[in-house]
Image (spheres, rainbow, N blue to C red):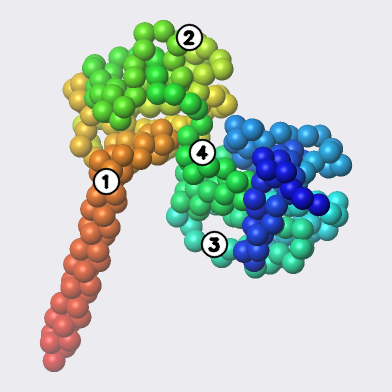
Amino acid sequence: MTARQGDYQSMANASGEEKVVLGRKFFPIVAGKTNGAHQKLINDLRSLDQVEVYSAADADYLMIFCPIASRVETDISQALSDVPANKDIILVAMHHIFNPDHVIPESKKHVHNPNVILAVDCLFHDGKLLLARRNDNSWYDITKVLGMPHSQISWFKKFLGRKFFVFVAGNPNGAHQEIIDHLHHLGQVEVDSISVSDYLVVLCPIASRVETDINVALSSIPVGKPIILVVMHHTYDPHRNIADSWRYVQNPNVILTVDYLFHDGKLLHCDRNQTSLCEIRTTLGVSSPESLGSCTEYVKKKWWIVVIAVLVLIAVVIIASVSTHFSKR
């Protein structure tokens, strides 16, 4: 049968062989407990004009979410054992872990079902996908196998447009203005009306308990608009260790939660703030050389700091060992 142009999506299976399937309707199968983390992937597929159906018979392909509870191979085999035959499958192996930099072997080597055209791995914790390189790569692979244009495959770019409206839920003493200036520098446009905005930037200075202040800040926000939530902690210590505030966010419209440290009306010069800025850039899909360059340089800087620290530690150990050796003699 000859494929009509525009009706087919180019796909590739785990072995790299090209394959085409008809249509864009998918049926999700959740083979375990994800605490709702898989829902983000489903929403993202919808944003790419994929259509969720409620019957495997009506689907063009299946999305199987397989949270790993015991052994990877065992859980994958069980997840695929009751799947309808003759349906193309995208398998998402989900690993519950709190460390976004955790290295896991690729699960596709445990897949033997010929209907699986793609197997990817995702990291999640507390019912949310982690902001992790592994997840970004997996989303890239999914969109690639669905034949999406390169411009559409940013994992974190969840809204169209550049117009944002600012909510300030407290008193940051003007420190938030630097964040707004950063957004302007990234080509984003501040507007004076919620109705014409593409997304909302909610600035939440912490005055009491983090969870309480976040809930209050989000309680009066209009529904239906994507939200970037900026949680601002007043402290003079740039090295203060604070817990990530995203764990307290229940509002499904919040697509990103970041933490900033500030004092006397100014943002502190610290790793936490630089990391938050990089996350905002990633979420906005910023691709200008200048924007990506500064984040890259920041990562390189941190890498060199770690290398130098390790070398200093090794030198201290060697000196201590030599001193101990000579003192014994």
**Residue 18 x, y percent position in the rendering:** 65, 59
Residue at the limit of the structure toward the bottom, as seen here: 329
Residue at point 56% right, 65% down? 105
Q: Is residue 216 above or below residue 9?
A: above
Q: Is residue 208 visible?
A: no
The residue indicated by pointer 4 is 152
Residue at point 65% right, 63% down? 17
Quadrant containing the C terminus in the rendered view: bottom left
Given residues 262 and 319, the one toward you in this image is 262
* Callout 2 secondary element: helix
Say which label, 3 or 2, has the lower sequence index.
3
**Residue 209 x, y percent position in the rendering:** 42, 24
Q: CA distance from mark 1 to mark 4?
A: 21 Å
Q: Residues within 10 Å of mark 4 (few under 14, many from 20)?
A: some
The residue indicated by pointer 2 is 195
Residue type for callout 1: Gly
The residue indicated by pointer 1 is 293
* Callout 4 secondary element: helix
Image quadrant of residue 194?
top left
Contact check, label 3 and label 4, Cβ < 8 Å: no
Q: Residues within 10 Å of mark 2 (few under 14, many from 20)?
A: few
Residue type for callout 3: Ile
Q: CA distance from mark 2 to mark 1?
A: 34 Å
Say which label, 1 or 3, has the lower sequence index.
3
Q: Is residue 40 above or below residue 122?
A: above
Label annotation for residue 65: none
**Residue 229 x, y percent position in the rendering:** 42, 26
The residue indicated by pointer 3 is 104
